[in-house]
Amino acid sequence: MTLRDYLHTVASTYDRTAGTGSPAAKLLRSAPSVFEPYIPASYTIKGSAGNGAGAFCPWVSFFDPDETTTATRGMYLVYLFAEDMKTVSLSLNQGVTELRETFGAREAEKRLRGEAAAIRDAFPGNMAGGLEDVIDLGGRSGLPRAYEAGNILARVYAIDSLPTEEVLKADLRRMIQLYQDALVLREDLRSTTRELITTIKPKVIGDQDPLLYFAPKSDTEYVQKITARLIKKSRKHETLVKRYGAFLADAGFTAGTNVHPRDLVARRDGDDWLIEAKVVRRGNVSHAVREAIGQLATYAFLLYPAESQPHRMALFTEAIGDVYVRLLSHQGIASVWPTEDGWAGSPEAVNAGLAQKEA
């Protein structure tokens, strides 16, 4: 199903009185299968028609898991359908529930509007050109009004005149980039003008160590310990590993993600692969590539006999460019990254069945 068909079908068939078992509600919950090709592999995708009673404004959200995995807190990207189903807004938005619980509904909405304006004004030049400061979901009190207050920037579409598929894809790519930029701008504002950005500390029960909640190989941040050194992994790292592990299984590999401290190992046709996953942060491909080379060399040397060294592969959250693909190949390392169509990679990766097409 195309993005255009998906948005139109949800809007034209949704009936909040039909409950969360209706076809439209089921379609909303199937959002990951529709949007995964167009969203960074590390992101969490969720669609919702509400809990119990149907939501007045159903939604499909995209979460950078290092920021949040829920619409109740933090910053996220979301398609918000208006109450009358005549428009859908692709909105860079903010969670309200946590603020409401702390400050009450009225003050929470005031803070949301203030933070949205501050982050919006911090974008340099014309980066946010052509986007909407205000969205209209119907103005109903409760969550719809909170969504309106939390909007930072949005692209609003009329359901009866949705743009082409290519425009929808381009808008989604642009908003994902603005999402990442906004996270950086917000932290700059937090450190320089503290009164503009609200900081709510996580709740800690008694004297419990927060690390007790960290679970290896889940989407929750955790800490690995290897040779007396702590390596902090992020949610987006583990989501990338999970999704690629599923691809490997479908491709006929025997894959393992519980082989500490390695991210992934895979075997097929007698060939063993040692795989290191790296998040490309803020476009810094060079740093991710250097880390991958170093860790693959270290793990291959320390964890495998000299006479039975594994093949090595580096997995990235985004394309790394031809120069770095060739650099890794020069080091004997295959490379793979997600695309809209699945997983692309270096010639070595494609030949081994670790990717679907060449860089």
Image (spheres, rainbow, N blue to C red):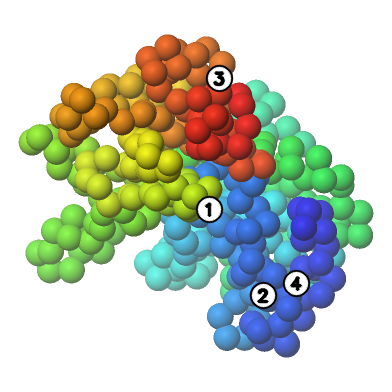
Tell me the residue at 61%/26% (across/down).
Answer: 358
In the foreground, 204 or 330: 330
Element type at marker 2?
Answer: helix
Res 351 → quadrant: top right
Tell me the residue at 18%/68% (across/down).
Answer: 205
Res 175 → quadrant: top right
Looking at the rendered structure, the kind of residue marked 2 is Lys
Residue count near mark 1 (Cα–Cα under 10 Å), binned few <14, some 14–19, many ≥20: few
| Callout in the foreground (1, 3) | 1
Q: Name the residue under label 2.
A: 26
Q: Mark 4 points at which residue?
A: 83
In the foreground, 63 or 201: 63
Closer to the chain start, of discs 2 and 4, is: 2
In the foreground, 36 or 358: 358
Return the x and y of residue 269 as percentages of the image width and height.
43, 41
Residue count near mark 2 (Cα–Cα under 10 Å), binned few <14, some 14–19, many ≥20: some
In the foreground, 230 or 72: 230
CA gap, disc 1 to disc 3?
26 Å
Q: Mark 3 points at which residue?
A: 321
Image height of 2 relative to 321, above or below: below
Tell me the residue at 47%/27% (across/down).
Answer: 335
Image height of 127 relative to 76, above or below: above
Return the x and y of residue 325 as percentages of the image width and height.
50, 19
CA gap, disc 2 to disc 1?
25 Å
Tell me the residue at 40%/22% (across/down).
Answer: 333
Quadrant for the N terminus in the image:
bottom right
Please indicate whether residue 140 sits to the left or right of residue 327 in the image: right
Looking at the rendered structure, the kind of residue marked 1 is Asp
Does the CB distance between marks 1 and 3 fall below 8 Å? no
Q: Name the residue under label 1.
A: 250
